[in-house]
């Protein structure tokens, strides 16, 4: 990616690139749906949990540690541990689906923890930051510390906006959920988490 010398244009490109990643279905999206059923503010707390991993990572990459996150050993360790954690979370969704009531506040972990764990368990999150993200950080550094700060704010704001939108949409529509809809949605969350978890484990073991 060629450096963008105009700060507003750079930040606009950050927003577009960030939203393209944020809106893709994945572990964070799945837990946002599940926790959104419990609390309309869940998305914001999930974004905070996500940011608790992401913002320190941005600083580490800014100070030159991209090779660590690009290393095959790091990716294998994160893939194995993360895959196991995501599968465990997935079966938690399955247990929720099999209950006969739709009473909220029953997943056993907070929205902050859900966002933190779903992010930390994803080796491709770290790989994205070690490649595409590192290039964006390099561009941000051309504008000094202010550029880095604005880049971080814009990128995380995309996470916050999307996760909040998803959780509020789920929460406001839950009164229309029949038991069948409830089971389908939580089965979707179970499948997303277990498929990603299995993929991460297989990738760590086979490559």
Image: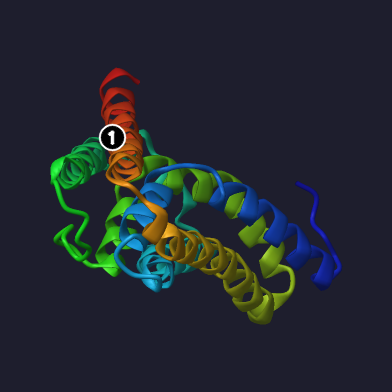
- Foreground pick, 159 / 170: 170
Outermost residue to the bottom: 146
Q: In this view, does 171 lie to the left or right of 141?
A: left
Q: List x then y, in percent, for residue 70.
A: 44, 42
Q: Where is residue 65 in the image (x, y as percent from the top left)?
A: 45, 56
Any part of residue 80 in sight: yes
Specify the quadrant that holds the C terminus. Answer: top left
Q: How many marks?
A: 1
Read off the residue under disc 1.
197
**Residue at x 43%, y 42% (from the top left corner):** 26
**Front-most of 52 and 45?**
45
Tell me which colouring the rendered structure shows: rainbow
Tell me if residue 70 can be seen: no
Give SS at disc 1: helix
Q: In this view, does 147 lie to the left or right of 184?
A: right
Mark 1 closeness class: few <14, some 14–19, many ≥20 residues within 10 Å? many
Q: Is residue 7 left or right of residue 110?
A: right
Left or right: 14 with respect to 172?
Answer: right
The residue at the point 29 percent across, 36 percent down is 187
Residues 198 and 74: in front is 198
Residue furthest out toward the top: 206
Q: Residue 96's x, y, as percent?
A: 17, 47
Give the residue drawn at x 19%, y 61%: 103
Report the residue at 32% width, 29% height from top: 195
Which of 173/123 is in front? Answer: 173
List x then y, in percent, for residue 110. 23, 67
């Amino acid at each position: 990616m060629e450096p963008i010398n105009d700060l507003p244009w750079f930040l606009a490109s950050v927003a577009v690139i960030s939203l393209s990643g944020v809106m893709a279905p994945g572990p964070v999206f799945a837990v946002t749906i599940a926790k959104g059923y419990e609390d309309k503010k869940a998305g914001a707390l999930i974004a905070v949990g996500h940011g608790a991993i992401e913002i320190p990572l941005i600083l580490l990459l800014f100070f030159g540690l991209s090779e660590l996150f690009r290393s095959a050993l790091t990716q294998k360790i994160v893939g194995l541990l993360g895959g196991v954690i995501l599968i465990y979370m997935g079966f938690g969704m399955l247990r929720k689906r099999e209950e006969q009531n739709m009473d909220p506040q029953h997943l056993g972990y907070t929205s902050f923890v859900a966002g933190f764990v779903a992010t930390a368990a994803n080796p491709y999150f770290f790989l994205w930051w070690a490649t595409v993200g590192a290039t964006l950080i390099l561009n941000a550094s051309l504008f000094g510390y202010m550029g880095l700060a604005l880049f971080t704010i814009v990128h995380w704001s995309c996470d916050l906006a999307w996760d909040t939108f998803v959780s509020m949409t789920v929460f406001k529509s839950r009164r229309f959920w029949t038991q069948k809809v409830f089971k389908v949605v939580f089965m979707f969350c179970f499948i997303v988490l277990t498929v990603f978890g299995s993929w991460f484990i297989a990738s760590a073991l086979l490559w």
